[in-house]
Image (cartoon, coloured by chain):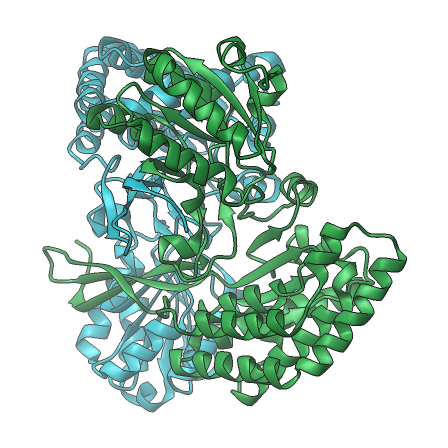
Chain colours: A cyan, B green
C-alpha cells in the first residue's frame, strides 16, 4: 500500500508538470468532456450510489449522512453543471498580476502559476470528487482525492467519468487520481506529503476530520475548523436592517459555516433593539441562549453558559449578549471567535471602519448577511473551501488561490553593478 | 526555559495585535528612533562586538566566521542606514489590492494585513537583529529573533537600541524580542510554533541551518536551501551579451545565492560560443568543470562528476555542459536545479518565452544576470530572504510578502437569497 501511494504521488507530480503547461483551451476541453461523460454515465453512477446507500442503511448510518451520500437524477445533473461552471471561470494561470520596470530598463513581471499537487480528503458527499477535481484542473493543479469509505462506489463511478474526459482531451489521467478507500494508511501518508509530492492538503468534511488534518499534516492545509460567526448590532444600527440581516444570517441555512452563532447588541440600544430581535428569532423557531440582560426579555430565552460563547451550533440556536459598545464587541469576538466571518450593523461609518479594521477575521462585513461567506457569493464561481489560516489562502479558496506565482525578468543584457 | 519561551510567544502575539493596528506614522517613528539609538549606542555595540570577537578568536573560529561577526564604525552606521531604508518603504498594511462590486451592490475589498508573528533564526551576522526586526515592524508583524551564540553580546547590544526606539515611539517592546542564546532548546520550540504563537519561520544562515529548519518546522518556512542557478546560452544568443552576463553572474560575487553555478550551451553554437566563454571564465580565475565537449576545449577544464550538476559551489567554480537545444536545457534544469533562479540568453523571443514558461523556478530571466535575484534589485527596498517554497512567498521576500489579507464586505442591508 505504501508503494501504491508513493506511485500515486510520483504520477501526480508528473501530471502536475503537464497540467501547468497545458493551454486554457485544452483544460476547458477536458472539463467539457468530463461533464459530457458524467451525463453519459448517469446510469452507472446511480447504480453505484444505490449500492453505497444499501450498505449505509445496513450499517445503520444516520439519515443526515444518507442524505449527503445519496445521488439521484437531479444531483448527477448538478455535478455536470458544476463542472461546466468551473469551465466557465477565467483561467488564472499565466495572468501577469504585477509588472514594473527598473531604472536599468529590466522589466519584472509577477505571473500566476499553479501550486502543484493538491490533496483533498473528504467525507460522505461523492460530488466533491468532481467539484474538487474540476477546480484543481482549471487552476492547473494535479489532484489526489481521498473520499469517505461510505461513498466508495459512487466516487469511483464519478471518477471514471472524469478520467474519460481527461483521456479524451489528451491530458494525463493521473491529473485527478482517486485513492482506494480500503487503504487505511492512505490519509496518514497524504498528511505527510507523499515524499514531497503533495503541496497542500484541503480537508472537506466535519470538524473531527478537519481537526485531525490540522493536527497531523506536515504540509500546508487550507481549511477552517469552525465558524463561530458574530453579528454586532451597534447603537447606530437601523432596527429594520438588523432584523432582516440577523434573520437571514441565522435562519436561511443553519448548517453553513457563515451562519451567525452569536448576536452582540450594544447596551445603548438594548432597550429598543434587543427585544424585537430576540422575539423575531424565537418566533422563527430559533432557540436563544442569552446573558442575564437577554434572559430578562423573554421567558423562552435559556441561560447561556460560558461554553456557548465559543460554540458553532450549525443549528437553529443562537447565543445573545449585551455589550458596552463596539470596543467590547471587538474584544468579545477576538476572545471567543474563530477568525472566520464577523459583521457589524451600523449607520455610523467611523464605527464600521473601526470594526472592519480591528476584527481579525478572514471576512468582515458591514451591513450585510454573514451567509455571504461563500466563494460563489464572492464571484469566484467555485470554491474548494474556506480558510482561516493566515498563509497563502484566506477566506473562500477559489481557482486563483490555488495558484502561486513566479517572477519573469525581461532584460536586454543587464548586469548587476 | 520552556516557561520563558512560552512567555515570549504570548508576549509576541499580544504585541502583534498592537502592531497590526499601529499607524504607519507610529511605526516609522519607531524606525527613526531605532536608527538614532543605534548611532547613539555605537560605543556600547562596538564594545560588545569586541568581546564576541575575542571569544571567537579564542575558540579558533574561521576567518570567514570572524568577518561575518565583526562590527566596526562603518558596519554600525550601515545598520542605522538599513533601518532608515526600511522606514522609507511604503507601508504595505491597509492597502486595498483588489475591489469589486457584486450585482447586489455589495463591494468586496481585499486588504493587506500583517501575518502576525515571524520567528527568525540566524547565525553569525549580528546586523540581522536590526534588519529583520525593522522589516517585520514595517509590515506590522512581531518578531522573535534567535541569533547565533557567537554574536550573543553584539546582538544583545543592537537589540537594546531597537527596544529603545520601540519604547520611545510608544510601541510594545515585545514587538521585537531576542531569545537568549544560552537556551539550547529555544530553536526546537520555535520550530514547533510556540503554542501557535509563531506564524512563520525564516532561517537566515548556512545550508545546515536551513535544512534543519525545513526538516523540523511544524509551521510554514520562508527559505531556500540552495541556489543551483543555471544560464542557458541559446543558439540565438549574442556572444558579446553572453560573455558580459556570464562573467557578471559568476564572478561579481561568488557567494550569493543568485551566482550562476552551471552554464548550459546549445550544441548549435558550441563551435563559436563555448570556447570564448570557457576561456573567459578560466582567465578570470574561475575553475571550470565540464562535460566531454567542454573538456575538449581547454586542458584547464576539469571533468565534471554527476554530483557537480546539482552542486551550489558559492565559489569561483562553474560546471559547463553542451545541450541539444532549449528543451534539453529545460530538462536539465528541472532535473538538477533547485527552483531558485535560472536564465536564458537569446535573441529569439519565442525560445525565451518557452524557457520562461517551462522552467519552474521562483525567478526566471531573459538576457539579464542571475545576480539580480535580490529584493533590493527587485525594488523591494529590503528582503528577509529568498524563498523557493510555493506557498505564500516565493522569490525575494520583502515587506509586502510578510503580509496576508482579509476581505472587507461593504453592504447596505444585503441578505443572501
Question: Is residue A46 among what the camera can see?
Answer: no
Residue for point 57% across, 83% down: B165
Residue A81 % position (x, y)? 18, 28
Q: Is residue B45 left or right of residue A40?
A: right
Residue at the extreme right of the image, as rendered: B58
A349 in relation to A27, above or below: below
Instruction: Please tell me which residue lies in front, A97 or B242.
Output: B242
Please state the total of marks drawn on the protein image.
0
Question: Is residue B82 among what the camera can see?
Answer: yes
Instruction: Please tell me which residue lies in front, B374 or B198.
Output: B374
Residue A287 % position (x, y)? 39, 64
B156 in relation to A269, above or below: above
Residue A303 % position (x, y)? 50, 73
Q: Quadrant of the N terminus of chain A?
A: top right
Quarter assignment of residue A323: bottom left
Q: Is residue B257 left or right of residue A280?
A: right
Residue A232 % position (x, y)? 34, 75
Residue for point 49% across, 37% down: B250
Instruction: Please tell me which residue lies in front, B117 or B101.
Output: B117
Residue at the extreme front of the image, as rendered: B283
Quarter assignment of residue A345: bottom left
A417 in relation to B76, above or below: above
Instruction: Please tell me which residue lies in front, A193 or A161.
Output: A193
Residue for point 37% across, 43% down: A385
Amino acid at each position: 500500500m505504501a508503494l501504491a501511494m508513493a506511485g500515486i504521488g510520483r504520477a501526480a507530480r508528473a501530471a502536475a508538470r503537464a497540467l501547468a503547461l497545458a493551454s486554457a483551451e485544452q483544460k476547458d476541453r477536458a472539463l467539457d468532456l468530463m461533464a459530457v461523460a458524467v451525463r453519459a454515465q448517469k446510469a452507472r453512477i446511480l447504480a453505484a450510489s444505490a449500492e453505497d446507500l444499501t450498505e449505509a442503511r445496513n450499517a445503520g448510518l444516520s439519515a443526515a449522512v444518507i442524505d449527503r451520500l445519496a445521488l439521484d437524477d437531479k444531483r448527477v445533473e448538478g455535478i455536470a453543471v458544476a463542472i461546466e461552471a468551473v469551465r466557465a471561470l477565467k483561467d488564472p494561470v499565466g495572468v501577469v498580476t504585477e509588472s514594473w520596470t527598473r531604472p536599468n530598463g529590466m522589466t519584472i513581471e509577477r505571473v500566476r502559476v499553479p501550486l502543484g499537487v493538491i490533496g483533498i480528503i473528504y467525507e460522505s458527499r461523492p460530488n466533491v470528487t468532481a467539484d474538487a477535481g474540476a477546480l484543481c484542473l482549471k487552476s492547473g493543479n494535479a489532484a489526489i482525492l481521498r473520499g469517505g469509505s461510505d461513498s466508495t462506489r459512487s466516487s469511483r463511478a464519478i471518477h471514471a467519468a472524469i478520467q474519460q474526459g481527461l483521456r479524451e482531451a489528451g491530458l494525463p489521467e493521473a491529473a485527478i487520481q482517486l485513492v482506494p478507500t480500503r487503504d487505511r494508511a492512505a490519509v496518514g501518508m497524504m498528511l505527510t506529503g507523499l515524499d514531497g509530492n503533495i503541496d497542500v492538503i484541503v480537508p472537506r468534511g466535519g470538524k473531527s476530520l478537519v481537526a485531525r488534518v490540522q493536527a497531523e499534516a506536515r504540509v500546508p492545509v487550507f481549511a477552517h475548523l469552525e465558524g463561530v460567526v458574530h453579528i454586532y448590532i451597534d447603537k447606530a444600527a437601523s432596527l429594520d436592517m438588523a432584523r432582516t440581516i440577523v434573520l437571514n444570517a441565522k435562519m436561511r441555512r443553519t448548517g453553513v459555516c457563515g451562519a451567525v452563532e452569536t448576536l452582540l447588541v450594544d447596551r445603548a440600544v438594548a432597550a429598543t433593539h434587543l427585544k424585537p430581535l430576540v422575539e423575531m428569532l424565537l418566533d422563527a423557531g430559533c432557540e436563544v441562549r442569552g446573558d442575564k440582560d437577554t434572559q430578562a426579555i423573554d421567558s423562552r430565552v435559556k441561560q447561556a453558559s460560558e461554553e456557548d460563547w465559543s460554540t458553532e451550533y450549525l443549528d437553529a440556536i443562537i447565543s445573545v449578549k449585551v455589550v458596552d459598545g463596539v470596543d467590547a464587541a471587538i474584544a468579545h469576538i477576538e476572545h471567543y471567535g474563530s477568525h472566520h466571518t464577523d459583521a457589524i450593523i451600523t449607520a455610523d461609518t467611523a464605527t464600521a471602519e473601526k470594526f472592519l479594521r480591528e476584527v481579525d477575521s478572514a471576512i468582515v462585513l458591514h451591513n450585510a448577511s454573514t451567509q455571504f461567506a461563500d466563494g460563489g457569493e464572492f464571484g469566484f464561481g467555485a470554491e474548494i473551501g474556506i480558510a482561516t489560516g493566515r498563509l497563502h489562502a484566506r477566506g473562500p479558496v477559489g481557482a486563483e488561490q490555488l495558484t502561486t506565482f513566479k517572477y519573469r525578468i525581461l532584460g536586454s543584457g543587464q548586469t548587476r553593478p
